Image: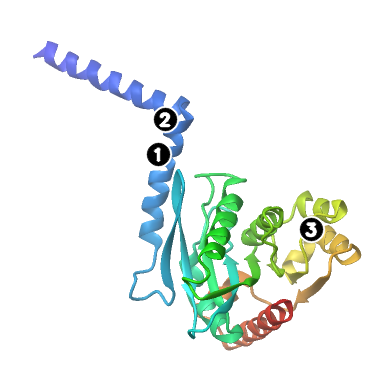
Amino acid sequence: MTAIIGTIGIFLLTLFGVLYSLLGYNMYFQTRFVEFMSAKAEKEGMKSEHTLKGERIFVEREEKRSSRVNLYRHGDEPLPVLYVLHGGSFTDQDADDIDSFCDEMALRVKAAVISISYTKMPVHTTTYPQEEITEVVQYFHAHAKEYRLDHDRYVMLGIEAGGYLALLSAVMLVRRTLVPDGLILLDPFADYVGTSFVQAGYHPGPAALLISGPREKDKKLMEYADVLSNGNVRSFIRRLFTKSELNTLIRGESLSEEQKKEREDLMDLLSDLFERMV
């Protein structure tokens, strides 16, 4: 009996050692494991099909996992496109979290709104998500007729982390001759990248930079705003006089009457910016 217990113990220790080696030292298996856990969590956090206001689409990508997007449109005629990239500090949130916002934008601006649930950290770090976003835009450009899109007119709207990724993706798209008509960046994450793009003459434009009160203390964001407004990029810089965080207003859940008014003003501004750009 003791020998059997010992054999089982050795087997379990050996199995643990093999698994530890695969996950601890092999990047391929680490990535596959994290992707599996991320996909499971993503599925659990997704809205059900009957509660989602948009149409869920999975964009197949060669040798990579497919990208999940939500498409919103009202009307049958070919429509310009507004790509939306959610916030969440690169690690949180999902396209489904801003489902109502995207549906309302589609109604207001008479556009096809495509909300991209890009891959977040720690599954993949940059440059993976901006490459993913770029490939999604390329896909819909190639299938514009199928989805009834006027893809010669498109704008990218990014919120916080999504704003940063919108900027990086736009630069990639310019290099692939799919130049966006404009960028709308809401409280984007800022480092030296945006400022460097302006100084080097690579910044895609026109660009609208919207900054809420709390983010005015972000030195890198304000430096980016200053360089953008004084550079050769056609830009619109606007401070948003909102008492609430932008993500709260955009998600639109359990808002007070004052917050509803702030959200309405924000939606009006976004609609106006989109219509100016396309």
Residue at the spot x=29%, y=23% of the render? 15
Q: Quadrant of the N terminus?
A: top left
The vertical placement of 209 against 37, above or below, is below
Q: Which residue is mark 2?
A: 23
Residue 37: image x %, image y %?
Answer: 39, 46
Which residue in the rendered view is the most extreme toward the left? 1
In this view of the protein, which residue sits in the foreground, 209 or 151?
Answer: 151
- The answer to whether marks 2 and 1 mark residues whose Cβ atoms lie closer than 8 Å is yes
Decide: is 87 above or below 263: above
Count how many numbered circles sit on residues in the image: 3
Residue 105 visible in the displayed image: yes
User: Residue 152 placed where, x, y %?
Assistant: 64, 71
- The structure residue drawn at horizontal position 62% and vertical position 60%, both measured from the top left corner, is 162
SS under mark 1: helix
What is the x, y in percent for residue 159? 63, 65
Of circles 2 and 3, the one toward us is 3
Q: In which image quadrant can residue 272 be found?
A: bottom right
Residue 228 in the figure: left or right of residue 111: right
Residue 203 image label = 3
Q: Residue placed at 56% from the left, 55% from the top?
A: 135
